[in-house]
Every structure is written in structure tokens, then in C-alpha cells.
Image (cartoon, grey):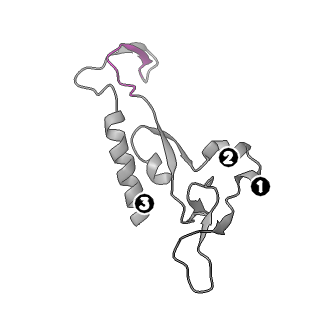
Amino acid sequence: AHAMMSLPATKGFEIGSGFGGTVMRGSTHNDPFVASAGAARAPNAPALTVSTNNAGGTLGGISSGAPIYFKVAVKSVSTIGQAQQTSTLGGDKITLEAKGRHDPCVLPRTPPLVEGMAALVLID
């Protein structure tokens, strides 16, 4: 979460069921371990997996072996080609008009940034 929130324009982060998990009972949100069929097994010990993945692949900050999944919320660009009202430090009302080249959407650059940051966090 710390790494993702350090990316430009990010405003939110959820892992697993995220905020939806806050309204679930603990017994429902629990990710119970179950024997994994067909997985490589140690002698006399079944390979385990989780039957659900509400925690998003982590349990107590440690990978559970389940796929890690999360969501990152990104805000829209506020520097737009439309005049906007603001104030100076002295309190005088002024109109702010963006000049020059400004991207109307950061979406094309967002997925590579999120994927790259996730890779860096996992390798760290």
C-alpha cells in the first residue's frame, strides 16, 4: 500500500476484498486452508491452499501462496484546459488557466507504473 500510494495521482488502495471485507463477518472473510489436489506433496504432509482468497494472497503480511491481488484508485487530472477559480496566498480571487501541453488522461501510463511498483515490492 505504501509503495502504490507513492505513485502520482493515486488516492486509494485495497488488497483482497478491501473495504468490502470490513462489512463481512470474520467467519465469512476467513480464508481456511484446505488440502490441495494434484499439487506436489512433501512426504506424509498434504500440500495446502486456501479455499477462498478474501485476503488477496496475504495473511498477516506474508504470502499465503494464493494469487496476490489488489486495486489502486487513481484520480483524474486536475490541470485541464478549462479556466478554474482559485485564490492567491493573499486571498485575492484569480482565474487559473492551464497553458502548454497537459495530458487529459493519465490512464495509459498507470498500468505500467502499478505493475512495475508491484514487481519492485515483491522482489524486495
Q: Main secondary structure of the magenta part?
A: loop
**For marks 2 and 1 on the same chain, the one whose residue lies earlier in the sequence:** 2
Q: Which residue is mark 2?
A: 21
Q: Of marks 3 and 1, which one's residue comes earlier in the chain?
A: 1
Which quadrant of the rendered structure holds the C terminus?
A: bottom left
Q: Which residues are magenta?
A: 77-88
- 105 or 67: nearer the eye? 67
- Pinpoint residue 91: horizontal percent, then vertical percent: 46, 18
Q: CA distance from mark 2 to mark 1?
A: 11 Å
Quadrant in which residue 61 is drawn = bottom right
Q: Position of residue 72 (x, y in %)?
A: 48, 43
CA gap, disc 3 and disc 1: 30 Å
Residue 55 at x, y percent in the picture: 61, 55
**Foreground label between 3 and 1:** 1
Q: Residue flagged by tag 1: what amino acid is it?
A: Ser
Q: Earlier in the sequence, mark 2 or mark 3?
A: 2
Tell me: residue 11, above or below residue 113: above
Q: Nearer the viewer, mark 2 or mark 1?
A: 1
Residue bearing the label numbered 1:
27
Instruction: Decide: few, some or many residues near mark 1? Use Cα within 10 Å; few <14, some 14-19, many ≥20.
Output: few
* Amino acid type, mark 3: Val
Say if the magenta span includes residue 78: yes
Q: Residue at x 41, y 55 (%)?
A: 118
Question: Where does residue 94 sit, x and y in percent of width and height?
Answer: 39, 13
Q: Residue at x 61, y 47 (%)?
A: 17
> Under tag 1, what secondary structure?
helix
Residue bearing the label numbered 3: 121
